[in-house]
C-alpha cells in the first residue's frame, strides 16, 4: 500500500488555531497526517511535553482515523523515515517563515531526497498567530482564547 503520509512537526507550545488550520486544510491531501511534537534544542518548552500532547490530542480527537499524535527526539527527516512519511508539512505566515522553512527544506532534501516538503499558507486571520506571541500574552495575564483551538482555550486561560 502506497499511503500518502505527511509529518507535521512542531513544538506546539501551545498548539494554536494556526496549527489546527494547517492540519485540517491539509487533511484532504493526505491519507494520514502525523502531528509530532519535536524536541527543539534551541527552545525551552513553556509547557511540559505530556500537556502539549494532551492538548494536540484534544484538538484533533474527531480525526483519530486520519491524524496520529506523537512526539520525537531525533532529526525530523529520520522520524519521517521511521513513520513512512514521504512529506513534511509546514505552514507559512510570512516571508520570514518562508526563508526559514525553505532552508530547512533544502537541508532535508540533501539528507533524504525522497521526502518532500509541502508548504501551506496560513489563512489571513491566522497569519499573526504564533506560540511565542500566545505565551507572551499569557505571561501578562491576557486573554488568548481567540488564538487557541476551542478544545484547549478555556483550560489554558484558567492556568
Image (spheres, rainbow, N blue to C red):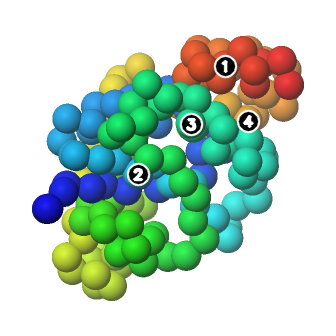
Labelled pair 4, 2 in contact (Cβ < 8 Å)? no
Q: Earlier in the sequence, mark 3 or mark 4?
A: 3
**C-alpha span from label 3 to label 1:** 14 Å
Labelled pair 1, 4 in contact (Cβ < 8 Å)? no
**C-alpha span from label 1 to label 4:** 13 Å
Labelled pair 2, 3 in contact (Cβ < 8 Å)? no
Q: Which percent across, then down, holds residue 121?
A: 29, 38
Point out which mark residue 57 bears.
Answer: 3
Q: Which percent across, then down, holds residue 55?
A: 64, 34
Q: Which percent across, then down, holds residue 79?
A: 44, 71
User: Is 5 above or below relative to 145?
Assistant: below
Labelled pair 3, 4 in contact (Cβ < 8 Å)? no
Residue that label 1 marks: 153
Q: Residue at x 18, y 57 (%)?
A: 3
For the residues carrying marks 3 and 1, which lies nearer the camera in this image? 3
Secondary structure, mark 1, is helix
Q: Nearer the viewer, residue 90 or 78?
A: 78
Location of the C terminus (image quadrant):
top right
Q: Residue at x 21, y 80 (%)?
A: 113
Point out which mark residue 34 bears.
Answer: 2
Q: Earlier in the sequence, mark 2 or mark 3?
A: 2
Q: Is residue 10 left or right of residue 140?
A: left
Q: Residue at x 27, y 38 (%)?
A: 26
Residue that label 4 marks: 135
**C-alpha span from label 2 to label 3:** 11 Å
Amino acid at each position: 500500500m502506497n499511503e500518502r503520509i505527511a509529518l507535521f512537526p512542531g513544538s506546539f507550545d501551545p498548539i494554536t488555531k494556526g496549527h489546527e488550520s494547517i492540519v485540517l486544510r491539509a487533511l484532504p491531501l493526505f491519507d494520514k497526517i502525523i502531528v509530532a511534537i519535536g524536541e527543539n534544542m534551541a527552545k525551552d518548552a513553556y509547557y511540559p511535553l505530556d500537556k502539549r500532547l494532551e492538548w494536540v490530542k484534544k484538538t484533533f480527537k474527531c480525526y483519530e482515523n486520519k491524524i496520529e499524535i506523537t512526539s520525537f527526539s531525533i532529526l525530523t527527516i529520520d522520524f519521517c523515515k521511521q513513520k513512512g512519511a514521504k512529506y513534511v508539512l509546514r505552514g507559512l505566515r510570512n516571508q520570514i517563515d518562508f526563508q526559514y522553512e525553505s532552508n530547512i527544506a533544502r537541508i532535508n532534501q540533501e539528507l533524504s531526497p525522497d521526502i518532500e516538503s509541502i508548504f501551506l499558507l496560513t489563512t489571513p486571520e491566522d497569519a499573526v498567530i504564533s506560540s511565542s506571541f500566545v505565551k507572551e500574552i499569557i505571561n501578562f495575564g491576557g486573554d488568548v482564547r481567540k488564538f487557541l483551538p476551542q478544545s484547549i482555550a478555556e483550560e489554558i486561560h484558567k492556568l
